[in-house]
Amino acid sequence: MEKLFITAEELLKSSFELGLKIFESDFNPTHVVGIWRGGAPVGVAVHEILDLLGVYTEHFAIRTSSYKGINNQSNEVRIFGLSQVIDTISSDSKILLVDDIFDTGRSVKATIEAIKEGSKLSKPCEIKVATVFYKPEKNKTEIKPNYFIHKTKSWAVFPHEMVGCTLKEIMEKKPVPERIFKILKGT
């Protein structure tokens, strides 16, 4: 599978662009929820843009888990840290879920369902989804992101990711300290 290597600067620039796109849509979220891991830095950048432009939000990071490795998902999506979000939701809440990539949509769908189920009497009035990268061909749900910057078919390799990369790819694409290669080679 073709890999798309994304630099930290490219991700940050695209994240700021995503925040601006949300602002220009006139959606003013009350909550920005970054989905850990990749959605956390994107969520921070989106939050910063919105805050700078006068849209003040609660902000959180939650964690979902469904991957066992590259292209290897388990059947169950587990969600951690959602109770803090649910505790602050009211019927006029507008939730923005933020992730680095939307592929199968399973994590986002499970998160939306968990928010609706967990908030029972005070369900938020709106939940929207924002992502930097969108893989429509991989989507296995009826959900589509409301906001995205790039469509791709490639495996996106984010700045922090090294597992799943070859040693050559790490050497060529990642700004890691050289001594890591000695450690990896066992010398």
Image: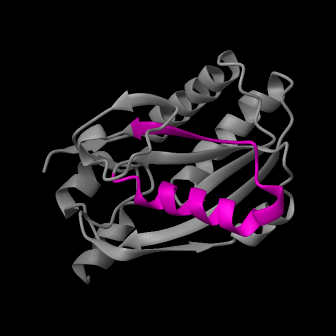
Residue farthest toward the top in the current orientation of the protein: 24
Q: In the rendered structure, does residue 126 fall within the stretch colored magenta?
A: yes
Residues 17 and 146: in front is 146
As drawn, the residue found furthest toward the bottom would be 186
Of residues 126 and 103, which is closer to you in this image?
126
Residue 68 can be seen, yes or no? no
Residue 111 in the image, given as x and y percentages of width and height: 57, 61
Residue at 81%, 45% in the rendered image: 93
Q: Position of residue 136 (x, y in %)?
A: 30, 39
> Is residue 123 something one can see in this rendering?
yes
User: What colour-coding does the image apply?
Assistant: one colour
User: In the image, what residue occupies the spot 29% across and 68% down?
Assistant: 181
Q: Name the residue rendered at 67%, 66% in the picture.
A: 117
- Residue 62's place in the image compared with 143, above or below, is below
Q: Quadrant of residue 182?
A: bottom left
Residue 43 image offset from top left, x and y in percent: 64, 45
Residue 152 higher or lower than 86, as above or below: above
Residue 129 position, x and y percent, is 56, 41
Looking at the image, is 56 positioned above or below residue 169?
above
| Residue 137 falls within the magenta-colored stretch | no
Farthest-out residue, front:
121
Q: Quadrant of the C terminus?
A: bottom left
Q: Is residue 152 found left or right of 58 in the rendered image? A: left
Residue 133: quarter of image: top left
Q: Residue at x 57, y 72 (%)?
A: 79
How many numbered marks are there?
A: 0
The magenta span reads 104-133
Report the side of 141 relative to 98 (left or right): left
